[in-house]
Image: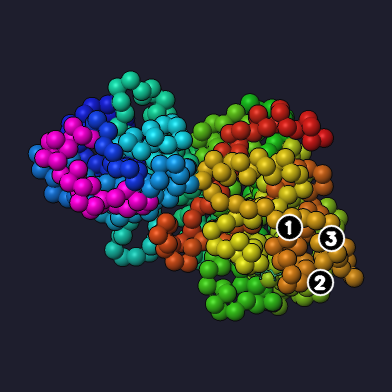
Amino acid sequence: MKIEVDSRALSEMSGDWLVIGLDERTILGEPVTLLDRELQGLLQRLIDNQDFTGKTGELVTIPGITGLDISRIALLGLGDPEKISPQNLLRCLVHSLRKITDKAVQRLVFHPWDMVTNSSLNPRRAAQIISQGAVMSGIGQGLYQTTQKRFEIGELVLTISPDSDSQDLKKALREGEIIGRGINIARTLINEPASRIFPESFAEIATSIAQEHNLHCHVFDESELRKEKMEAVLAVGCSSDQPPRMVLLEHNPNRDQSPPLVLVGKGVTFDSGGLSLKTAEGMQTMKCDMSGAATVLGAMQAIAELNLPVRVMGLMGLAENMPSSKAMKVGDVIRARNGVTIEVLNTDAEGRLILADALSYAVDLGASHIVDLATLTGACVVALGNDVTGVMSNNQSWADQVIRAAGESGEPVWQLPLFEEYYELIRSQVADIKNIGGRAGGAITAGKFLEQFVGTTPWVHLDIAGPAFAENSTVWGESGATGCMVATLVSLSSHFTHINKEVAPSME
Ligand code: BES
Ligand code: ZN
Ligand code: ZN
């Protein structure tokens, strides 16, 4: 997407669309008032006649504009100015721009200032969100439809006032675009069927993204997984004809040895449940079970493109969970990389097995902090619904940083406790622990399981089983993969040097 800023009068702009953002007070600022004169007061009439009220997500389109170089105008409602937040703005954009990107869009001019100026959002952050939303609105899950239904915006032009810092706003637009592209990488990988995305093909895509963006990349094949004692990853992956992999990416701009932030992702490219087979319905969306790994990959690309001054590693555990005569059996005991023995009482609780090895490996990499992302439990969806990510942690100040980054990125999250009592639910009579904890507190017992593999390293687990994939379009978002938490990881990484200095010492 090309990006431009333009300080000329609105009547001098050119493009397929001019989108004007207004909150529900519907007060036209000077640039729009001047434009409206050229339009013989059309916009004010729409407002006076209540044909546009500025309520959240409202979009009134006016095609067939004459006398200007703009073909169509859209009024976009942003609701209560007191409530305009990153989340609200992003949702309004994604929702409304979808009605615009269902046709080819060469050039879209955005004038958000009549609402942004009056809200708590600063112009820079607003510009970032606008370009992120514009990029996100250009793709959907209809990857294999013969008739294209979604089109990427060719060029985004942000109007600016002559006295604003045009370079800084352009930079902010560029940053939002990079985050949007990271999100779209994750969405596309998740939306692709499991026949196309399996451990080896995922690893190849990660390798080529790494080459393109100057990330160090290492792919562990089966023999290396064996050498690294990743028995749990091998146990999940061994039943499939598609062999398991682990991918490690590194962004290290200063080429130093500072303890890295390690992002860990569950990458089950298809989760049939294994011998503890899922129902036909339960399997329908299970191509999305590599969302954690896709999120890490999308975030790593954005972190590299933004060249954030921080050492970040991305670790993706990849396997296909299938039933076969080679499959891991119920009652098997496996020894994870850190020596903890696990009794497998349900082969459908496979994500935590992969993460057990990946988290142990992250600790051995010398991680200063860890975040893992996984479509881990249906129980988290029961607890928090489809839109909210579950947060669990062994370190409250690290959890607070992640929660703050999610807030800045407009992504809803909610913390669940990891009280000591829950450990009793995963104690095994045969091995150290078992991989299921019963019906009660299922998201938490999964989190408690993961905690056994991070030692004392500050760690946050994000259960994205609900928000990673939307079965149906909602008023806010396109159906299919959402790319949730990519923006949060980027925001978290951008604050990380600071976090390291200010918070890490007190956490020792
Ligand atoms: N991949 C699933 C969890 C999931 C469910 C993701 C719904 C997205 C939407 C995971 O591997 C799984 O099957 N978990 C089991 C755990 C149970 C056997 C303890 C579950 O949640 O039912
Ligand atoms: Zn499963
Ligand atoms: Zn799974």
Q: Quadrant of residue 149?
A: bottom left
Q: Does the numbered disc 2 mark a residue whose Cβ is under 8 Å from ligand 1?
A: no
Q: Quadrant of the C terminus?
A: top right
In this view of the protein, can residue 289 be seen by the observer?
A: no
- Residue at position x 52%, y 72% from top? 284
Secondary element under disc 3, as helix, strand or loop, is helix
Q: Which mark is residue 332?
A: 2
The three-letter code of the residue at mark 1 reads Gly
Residue 166 visible in rendering: yes
| Way the structure is coloured | rainbow
Residue beneath the point at 73% across and 66% down: 441
Query: Of tags 1 and 2, which is closer to the observer?
Result: 1
- The numbered mark at residue 421 is 3
Q: 248 left or right of 473? A: right
Ligand 1 within 8 A of label 3's CB?
A: no
**Amino acid at circle 3:** Glu
Mark 1 beta carbon near ligand 1 (under 8 Å)? no
The vertical placement of 346 against 503, above or below, is below
Q: Position of residue 303 (x, y in %)?
A: 55, 37
Marks 1, 3: nearer the viewer: 3
Sequence-wise, which precedes: disc 3 or disc 2?
A: 2
User: Which secondary structure lies at badge 1?
Assistant: helix
491 or 327: which is nearer to us?
A: 491
Q: Which residue is mark 1?
A: 447
Give the magenta range.
32-60
For the residues marked 3 and 2, what is the alpha-carbon distance in whole angstroms?
25 Å
| Residue 154 as seen in the image, left or right of residue 202 | left
Q: Position of 105 compared to 172: left or right?
A: left
- Tell me the mark number nearer the camera, choosing from 3 and 2: 3
